[in-house]
Amino acid sequence: MDNNDPYLLYHGVLVTKVSHTDDSLKYYESFQVQDDDVIAITYPKSGTTWMQEILPLLLNGGDLTPVLTIPSWDRVPWLDGLRILGIADKLSAPRAFVSHMPYHLMPSSFFSSKAKVIYVSRNPKDVLVSTFHFHQMASFLHDPGTFEEFADQFLAGNVIFGKWTDHVKCWRNTDLGDRILYITYEEMIQDLHGVLERMLLFLGKSMSKDALNRVTEHCTFKTMKQNKMSNYSLVPEALMDNKKSFLRKGIVGDWKNYFSPELESKFNTAISEELKGMDITFPLG
Ligand code: A3P
């Protein structure tokens, strides 16, 4: 990896230089996780931004002020990102964070804390399609090449935060017990209200029926796409081509528009092989 490469290698995991530096990663390692912190963990393009919208609302009784006035990345910062250095001491409890880090690379204070984790997974074929488009709009990521070429890179784990299968496996095999809740992007699309109720229960929070209905409506794709604090339109053009939307389609099954039958078969075989022996399955269809 040379100096012009947009990525850094952190304990074998690729991260972008635009969001991580040696100093920020040192800060991350010694970060003091608090018992009432909530951390949404995702593999990239699985619903991170969605969590940055939902979590503050569930934690504050449904007050829309923060999601309408603070950019997503400062409202629910990346635990391991560069920006947290400037804002960590301004966050009020209970704090919410997001991270794409694998389990074993969480900061040591996380393991001794009682902080709760919400792990969001998404069909890896839709993750691949979403990631492919993100690489086309972000100047701080490698040129993805053709969709087929990028699919090979994705399956080999030559992408930021490594292999999708390694990520879902490490977060399924934790010692966190009832500190972790698993949800899927597909469940959120199917029944957002129901998932928000499950999240509230897990977080030990409650909300009036009206407030929950308002939060559910606020967190729909259509509404979030209009929220400039969440739709990434505030990111400078030099970093992201905003003619392409970060909140792109927000649907389940877009992969069917991209996968040839041959790629589908290769992809399913590779993913199933790597998930063999796990007691859960992920949606591949
Ligand atoms: P698509 O590219 O398939 O549209 P992340 O935030 O982890 O980077 O994930 C981005 C993906 O989540 C994008 O998927 C984006 O459109 C989708 N997304 C974000 N908010 C959403 C919402 N409220 N409803 C549905 N999808 C949403």
Image (cartoon, grey):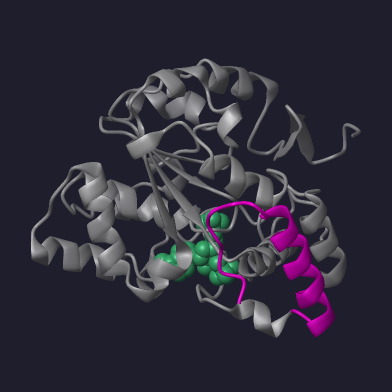
Look at the image and tell me in which quarter the C terminus lies.
bottom right
Task: Give residue 138's quadrant in the image.
Answer: bottom right
Q: Is residue 78 magenta?
A: no
Instruction: Report whether 172 appears left or right of 96.
Output: right
Instruction: Please tell me which residue lies in front, 245 or 258.
Output: 258
Q: Position of residue 235 (x, y in %)?
A: 56, 52
* Residue depicted at x 32% and y 30%: 91
Q: Position of residue 160 (x, y in %)?
A: 71, 46
Q: Position of residue 79 (x, y in %)?
A: 49, 33
Instruction: Please tell me which residue lies in front, 206 or 220.
Output: 206
Instruction: Report whether 176 appears left or right of 248.
Output: left
Q: Specify whether residue 81 is in view.
A: no
* Residue depicted at x 58% and y 79%: 253
Instruction: Please tell me which residue lies in front, 14 or 81.
Output: 14
Instruction: Please tell me which residue lies in front, 183 or 6.
Output: 183
Q: Is residue 162 above or below residue 80?
A: below
Q: Position of residue 102 (x, y in %)?
A: 60, 37
Instruction: Report whether 97 appears left or right of 211.
Output: right
Instruction: Report whether 260 appears left or right of 97.
Output: right
Look at the image and tell me in which quarter the N terminus lies.
top right
Chain part drawn in magenta = 259-285
Q: Is residue 282 magenta?
A: yes
Q: Is residue 254 above or below residue 85?
A: below
* Residue depicted at x 8% and y 59%: 208
Task: Give residue 96's quadrant in the image.
Answer: top left
* Residue depicted at x 79% and y 84%: 261
